[in-house]
Amino acid sequence: MNIRRIALGLIVSAVCLYFVLRGVEWSAVLNHLSQVNLPLFLFSMLLMLAAYFLMAWRWQLLLAPLELPPAPDANDSLESTSVVQDVSVQQEGLFSLYSKMLTGYFFNAFFPARAGDLVRAYLLGRKTGLRKTTVLATIVIEKAFDGIALLVLFLISLILLPAAISNASGVSPDVLAWVAGVALIAAIAGLVLFYRFSDRIVQLVGRIFDVLPLPRRLERLAVRLIETFAGGMHIFKTPRPLLFAGIISLVIWGVVAAMFLAALVSFKASFPAEMMTIAGLLFMTGLVNLGLLVPALPGNVGTYEALCVAAMAVFGVTKELAVAFALVFHVGQLVTTLAVGAVAFWSQNLSFAEMRPVEEKAEQEAAQSLDMLDPEVRP
């Protein structure tokens, strides 16, 4: 399966790079790159690190309702040691979570299928004793909130974009707004249904797959993903942490939009006025980051550049300027994440030789814990 994922990512990235770089005048691209204001660009990278810090804060809020397993005591019986201590994961410091999150993003640049998230879950589980799948459930909820927040900001941008954008680019903001609105309503409704009826949904999906002539492996994968998300929703006895997480998610992507603005301003060339407005920045932020759901090579090589160029084309930016921005912006993010992530990785007291077994162990434990019951014993 990993080979297939890598092959698919390689194909997608190669196709994206082909269309992005085809017909580009490299002299113009190099001219734009030579005029970048370095201090302003570095400030945009600091905003990215600030967004990561907000993500760590959100993760801490999602972890807070969890309870740590008890420390084993030789004098206790098996029954007494199975009782969970009333100890919150809130004791795990924010900077410690920030370090683990950056370590995960560091390894996302190397491992396919965002396996850095598995590394992050393993690191926290190793320190706190929490099951890795329980930590993974909170990470899945993170991704859901990111998707919803991006849809909200993307919808706002489409409502605010002027009609002139449609006439110049052939893209109708109204049509995209309807699509984004429907997707947003479906995502929020799905989140509420999962929170209220997760057990029933898991059973319903299992029954649907029993009727459909689909491979059993596909059924197990679908139900496994649903159970992971449902397990994360069960953590929250009240919706308050989820509401706070949703608000923080909006702030996170607002900071990312500010990061786009700082990087754009660092270029000497002038970008269209519509693109520099709040609506234009939210449009770029939403389109680029929602588009990253498409599988690609580790680090989103190719897809990130294609999405940046496509978003700028809507505003009539020349291809050379768009390519220059996409290349330096993506490289800047990768270099910054790798540099800071390497320091965070070093702080975990692990070596590179240990990381492959760590990743494999985390994946095996997740698969074992999330394996649903065999068809013969499933209710």
Image (spheres, rainbow, N blue to C red):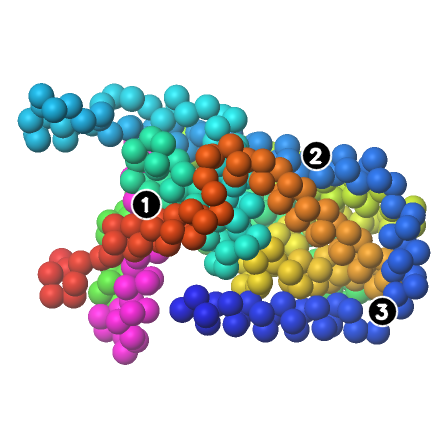
Q: Label 1 to label 3, Cα distance in Å?
A: 46 Å
Q: Label 3 to label 2, Cα distance in Å?
A: 30 Å
| Residue 46's disc number | 2
Under circle 1, the secondary element is helix
Provide the residue designation for mark 3: 24
Instruction: Give the image quarter of residue 223.
Output: bottom left
Instruction: Give the image location of residue 133, x and y in percent.
Output: 32, 45
Instruction: Give the image location of residue 188, x and y in percent.
Output: 45, 47
Going from N to C along the chain, the mark reached first, 1 or 3, is 3
Provide the residue designation for mark 1: 133
Amino acid type assigned to the residue bearing label 1 in the image: Thr
- Residue visible at 86% across and 58% down in the picture: 321
Amino acid type assigned to the residue bearing label 2 in the image: Leu
Q: Is residue 25 left or right of residue 186?
A: right
The region drawn magenta spans: 209-237
Neighbor class of circle 2 (other Cα within 10 Å; few <14, some 14-19, many 20+) is: some
